[in-house]
Amino acid sequence: MKVFSRLVFVSLWAVVVLAAQDRPPNIVIIFGDDIGYGDIGVFGHPTIRTPHLDRMAHEGQKWTNFYAAASVCTPSRAGLLTGRLPVRSGMMHDRVRVLFPESWSGLQQSEVTIAEMLKQKDYAAMHVGKWHLGHLPDYLPTKQGFDAYYGIPYSNDMDATQPGDKRRHALLHPDRIDYWNVPLMRDEETIERPANQYTVTKRYTEEAVKFIEKNKDRPFFLYLAHTMMHVPLFRSQEFTDRSMAGIYGDAMEEVDWSVGQVLDALRRNGLAENTFAVFTSDNGPWLIFDTHGGSAGLLREGKGSTWEGGMRVPAIVWRPGTIPAGTTQTGMGSTLDLMATVAAMTGTKMPDDRKMDGYDLGGAMKMTSPSPRNEMFYWRGTRLFAARLGDYKAHFFTQTGYRDRGETRQNPPLLYHLGRDPGEEHDISRENRGVVARIRKLAQEHELDIDEVENQLAKIGDRN
């Protein structure tokens, strides 16, 4: 009788797994905030322990030349969700670099997001975590294709209650949640203010797992965008003083735990082989906050800049049985490519009435073909600062991410070979003038392809 029962259970489990594999793959995008290229164990951090991300890489694939769409929060998120450079959607500005609580615009409903695209196949879609694409009703996730939302609508250092002279101290010593009066929202309603950020990573994770459990019998899209590692840093009691790397390590290790919980939920429900999961970051580390900021590893500079440390980010992709386990892809990729990649694997169609900037990376992830991306454009606001073509990167303007009031025009452009010199230390422009000319031509053609649009980040303050 026990043998018969076991056979019935195994048969039923096989039916569940086969049924899951017959439908389009589930999509899970886990997006860290300000996580640097060198902040994860599998990317070389010596003291931050990330066993779940390391396992994800061992079961999946690490990308070493993967880029965010921009070097700061708002435009980076716009690029990921739309597959378009944020300068095309009016989500980049030279001075107002991100949306604020005083902003009265956001990502326009005319833009098409991954969530809206997946509605072609009746995907359930939920956004958990940081949105930062507009906090007013017309711009919330529920107006951009998501069925549900749970999270903080903008950066966790906004709505500050401390005066300016005490603000940095508060950021580095976040002793009270009411130092920032940020709201926690469910769908379109505020359910807690100020949000208890000590438990926000844990609660994001619980919501994500509930969504997976609820929708295990249909295709779903989970976009989990963590508030951490944006300063101020918070972690739950279970992770306090746990890491050798201090509060930054504590918070990063809790994000790693969260990744483990999400992947375990997929495994537990027989969904692993039919789920495409990605972990990456919105931009590089916020270096001005000392040990509360992360590490770009051997890359130069960090968040806010168009040096490699500002836009090259850690990336891990995972789909057991489809993406070869334990592989490393050194070809170029970007969050801009996720929409095209998802469209190809789900059989959905991207919009054909606008310029798109992504490539389908499916073949590169399977290691059956090289990455189709051979160029990357580094915009800062509405100005193209740098461009990469193959292994070479040319800087037309340079500026640090923060504390630098003006850019430096580079004429002739600086040139680096990123394969031999990923830290951008040795300018080789003089001996490679032909390469500089090719990249300059590529950049000029690209700039001609950018139409002027109404800027949404400039809409801040008094509407009158």
Image (cartoon, rainbow, N blue to C red):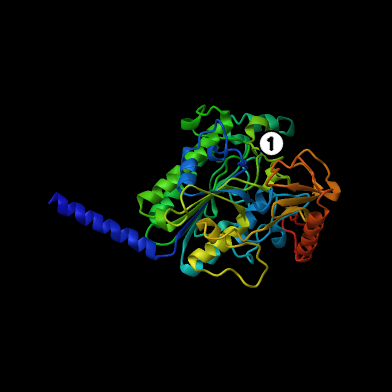
Q: Is residue 253 left or right of residue 82?
A: left
Residue found at the very far left of the displayed protein: 1
Q: Position of residue 332 (x, y in %)?
A: 63, 54
Q: Residue at x 62, y 49 (%)?
A: 65
Quarter holding the C terminus? bottom right
* Number of numbered discs on residues: 1
- Please tell me in which quadrant of the rendered image residue 293 appears: top right
Q: Is residue 378 left or right of residue 208?
A: right
x and y percentages locating residue 329 in the rendered image: 56, 51
Residue type at the position of mark 1: Leu
**Residue 362 percent across, percent down from the top left:** 53, 60
- Residue 424 image offset from top left, x and y in percent: 74, 42
Give the quarter of the image for residue 310. Answer: top right
Q: Which residue is mark 1?
A: 287
Query: Does the image show residue 149?
Result: no
Can residue 459 be seen here? The reply is yes
Pick the residue in front: 209 or 411.
411
Which quadrant of the structure image shows residue 32? top right
Residue 264 horizontal side relative to residue 11, left or right: right
Residue at the extreme bottom of the image, as rendered? 353
Badge 1 crowding class, 10 Å Cα cut-off, few under 14, some 14 to 19, many 20 or more, is: many
Q: Tell me the SS state at disc 1.
A: helix
Residue 366 vs 100, above or below: the answer is below
Lateral position of residue 76 relative to residue 193, left or right = right
What residue is rendered at 51% in x and 36% in y? 253
Q: Residue furthest right?
A: 411
